[in-house]
Amino acid sequence: MTGEELQRELERLHAASFGWALTCCRWNRDEAEDVLQTAYVRAIEGRARFNGHASTRTWFFGVVRNAAAERRRTRLIRGEAWVRWLQRAPSPEPPPTPEGASDRAESCRRVREVLTRLSSRQRELLHLVFYQDLTIEQSAEVLHIPVGTARTHYQRGKARLRDLLAEEGR
């Protein structure tokens, strides 16, 4: 794939890639933007190479996930996570929505909140399958895990999500 073809494909995948970056960064928009920018630079400069064994989408989602993981490790090393843990700062609430969309915003908030209670592997897998329309097999490739393990996390994640949402509804 030429550099121009890769650029066009990455442009086509931008919205989905940003959604995946948000998930990898626990919905921290600033961090997701930085992670996605890092992934683009790695792809365009050739530091992350597309070998053709997977779809461009699956490959690039792996690049984004690796960039997010590297950023998390760096942040932990610098101690930002320790400071946040000590302060126990709550996640910022989303900005107010128009009145007509308040029910949808509340539902989205509830689902996001419940998703944070899943294991990171379950959360990432459910995001790839439901929001990015990847198969379980493609998601396993992005996450670098065996397909059987992905199927197990997928089933357990769905069951846990269902149970947690039922608890929230009470």
Image: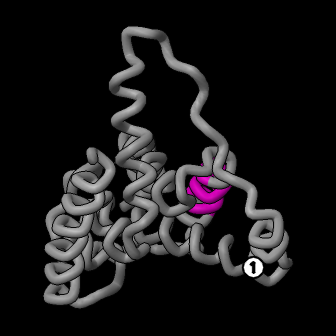
* Residue 34 in sight in this render: yes
Residue 160 image-quadrant placement: bottom left
Residue 77 image-quadrant placement: bottom right
Q: Residue at x 51, y 18 (%)?
A: 97
Secondary element type, mark 1: helix
How packed is label 1: few (under 14 Cα within 10 Å), some, or many (20 or more)? few
Across and down, in percent, residue 80 comes to 82, 70
Above or below: residue 115 compared with residue 149: above
Q: Residue at x 14, y 79 (%)?
A: 151
- Left or right of 104 on screen, residue 63: right
Quadrant (top left/top right/bottom left/bottom right) for the N terminus: bottom left
Magenta residues span: 32-41
Q: Which residue in the protein does label 1 denote?
A: 76
Above or below: residue 113 compared with residue 126: above
- Left or right of 150 on screen, residue 104: right
Q: Residue at x 46, y 56 (%)?
A: 23
- Left or right of 74 on screen, residue 170: left
* Residue 8 in sight in this render: no
- Left or right of 51 on screen, residue 148: left
Magenta-drawn stretch contains 36: yes
Amino acid type, residue under disc 1 in the picture: Leu
Magenta-drawn stretch contains 40: yes
Across and down, in percent, residue 93 comes to 61, 38
Across and down, in percent, residue 106 comes to 40, 32
